[in-house]
Image (cartoon, grey):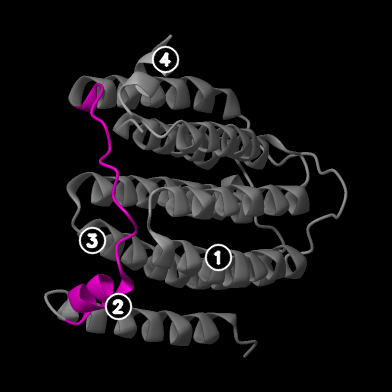
Amino acid sequence: MLAVNFLLLGAALFAIGVYGVIARRNAVMVLMSIELILNAVSLNLVAFSLMTGAVDGQVFALYVIAIAAAEVGVGLAMVLMIYRNRKTIALDELSEMKG
Amino acid sequence: MSAVILAADGVNVSQNVGFGIIAAIMIFAALNVVTTKNVVHAALWLVVVLSGVAAQYILAAAEFVAISQVLVYIGAVMVLFLFGIMLTRAQIGKEAGLNNTGWVLGIPVGLVLFGLLAWVILDAFGDDLLPDRGPAPTVMLSDQFLGIYLIPFLAISFVLLAAAIGAIVLARKD
């Protein structure tokens, strides 16, 4: 199996995730796109681990999974708080910081 | 044609076929996640992508990571997402206004990013073959976690604890 298979799949998932982060207006959808990006990265890490024969890539992939779980927990709690205060989670309406 | 060359090199053809099928499903599902008009459908398509990633981990001989992916992502993270969708009272049908006004800008950004990444990857790894290794034993992983990666391992426990407490504090009513 060619090494570029995994890496190109990771690149495609990453690009789709970046498109989602830019295009989506709903905060939960943006968090889902961030999950796509994180998965693309850990797919690359596992492929590198297979390439070199060391398991460090898999260790890093497990760290990415743990960080992603923490990120989703805090992110969704923030989204819930924004919803409670503003009754909307559309990201372009949160513009108090704009001068 | 390249498939014939690959077969001549003693490449595992069934592995390549499996990879191709799963990868096509994953790309289709990922495109649906970012384009569908229904928030609940987006979450369900995300399940397909995450299961595909787990399947690719198994193809890449990383069973422990694959099991963790299923447990953490499909088991826990997706439930969190569905709770988030439910508690923010998204419509259960089609919903207008899920995209930004400038969403078209995302298409060239995504395409350019993918082109650049693909060019760099093909330039650097060209036709490197992955060696035909068996699965790495989980003992090796645990040796790494409790050996040189012990400090980051402890640090990530504190990160998870802080995230759990922070999420509770943020989401409490009073």
Residue located at (62% from left, 44% from top):
A25
Task: Kindly report which numbered mark, 4 or 3, lies closer to the viewer in this rendering.
Answer: 4
Outermost residue toward the left?
B148
Residues shaded magenta: B125-146
- Label 2, on which residue? B156
Residue assigned mark 4: B4
State the quadrant of the C terminus of chain B. bottom right
Crowdedness of circle 3 by 10 Å Cα count: few (<14), some, many (20+)?
Answer: many
Res B129 → quadrant: top left
For marks 4 and 1, give the CA distance. 35 Å
Q: Residue furthest right?
A: B93
Q: Please provide percent x and percent y for residue B1.
A: 43, 9
Pointer 3 residue: A55
Q: Secondary structure at mark 4?
A: helix
Determine the CA span between mark 2 and mark 3.
19 Å
Q: Chain of mark 2?
A: B
Secondary element at image label 3: loop
Query: Please, which chain is the residue tagged with disc 4 on?
Result: B
Counting labels gives: 4
Amino acid at circle 3: Val
| Mark 1 vs 3: CB contact within 8 A | no
Residue B70 tag number: 1
Q: Which residue is rendered at x = 26% and y = 71% of the image?
A: B141
Tags 4 and 2 touching, CB below 8 Å: no
Q: Is residue A88 magenta?
A: no
In-front residue for pair B136/B107: B136
- Residue B115 visible in image: no
